[in-house]
Image (cartoon, grey):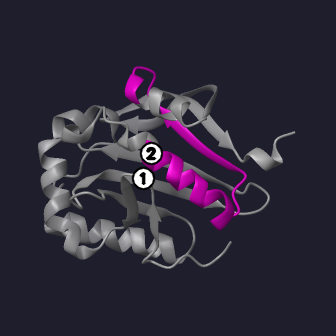
Amino acid sequence: MAFVPLDTVIPAERLALMAARKSDYEEWAELRRISRAHLEPWEPSWPRDALSRKDWHRRVSAWTKAWKTNSGYVFLIRRHSDNALLGGASLTQVRGWPANSASLGYWMGEPHGGQGYMKEAVNALCEWAFPMLNLARVEAGIVPENDRSRRVLEGTGFAEEGRATAYLEIAGTRRDHILFALVRADIRR
């Protein structure tokens, strides 16, 4: 796996993905605050100090450590036209040979949903990750009723692979997930 600088920017038509910085705190906290009711049903339980500066520093520290060890890459998504923070996307559990795979996660602030931004971000992230991280597969899981996430994954070429029982804790409960994967085109049999 190649070294990936922390100042990496992945451009797309209307947006760019970039690593979170400590200076992003205010905008991140505000977007997550106004989107909380929208996000909580699809995410692990928020910590008691969610959205605090301490929570932010904990996150950025963990994300930076993962980045430096090539085990995970967390990006914020910003719109080109006004640099507004739209959401985030990540590749975590990055595994080298023989798996050469990673897990995709993402979130979109409620005011920005339904405008195609997440499809654009996921597409750009995967196009970057396959060659840069030498991935063969990018995997994702969604709770069965998350129709918006299903549309994002299917709209970016992910194929449904099956169901995983009690796959992740979401909103305080172990939840089944529908598993999807995108396989690098040049290695398909």
Q: Is residue 119 above or below residue 54?
A: above
Q: Are marks 2 and 1 in contact (CB under 8 Å)?
A: yes
Residue that label 2 marks = 120
Numbered disc 1: secondary structure: loop
Q: Amino acid at mark 1?
A: Glu
Single out the mark in the foreground, 2 or 1: 1
User: x, y (%) of residue 147?
Assistant: 40, 22
Numbered disc 2: secondary structure: helix
Q: Is residue 131 above or below residue 150?
A: below
Q: Nearer the viewer, residue 123 or 153?
A: 123
Q: Amino acid at mark 2?
A: Glu
- The structure residue drawn at horizontal position 65% and vertical position 75%, both measured from the top left corner, is 2
Q: Quadrant of residue 1?
A: bottom right
- The structure residue drawn at horizontal position 33% and vertical position 40%, both measured from the top left corner, is 43
Residue that label 1 marks = 13
User: x, y (%) of residue 91?
Assistant: 51, 56
Q: Nearer the viewer, residue 41 or 112?
A: 112
Q: Nearer the viewer, residue 176 or 28?
A: 28
Range covered by the magenta-colored residues: 120-148
Distance (Cα) linking label 2 and label 1: 8 Å
In the figure, is residue 43 to the left or right of 98?
left
- The structure residue drawn at horizontal position 17% and vertical position 34%, both measured from the top left corner, is 37
- Is residue 75 in view from this perspective? yes
Labels 2 and 1: the sequence-earlier one: 1
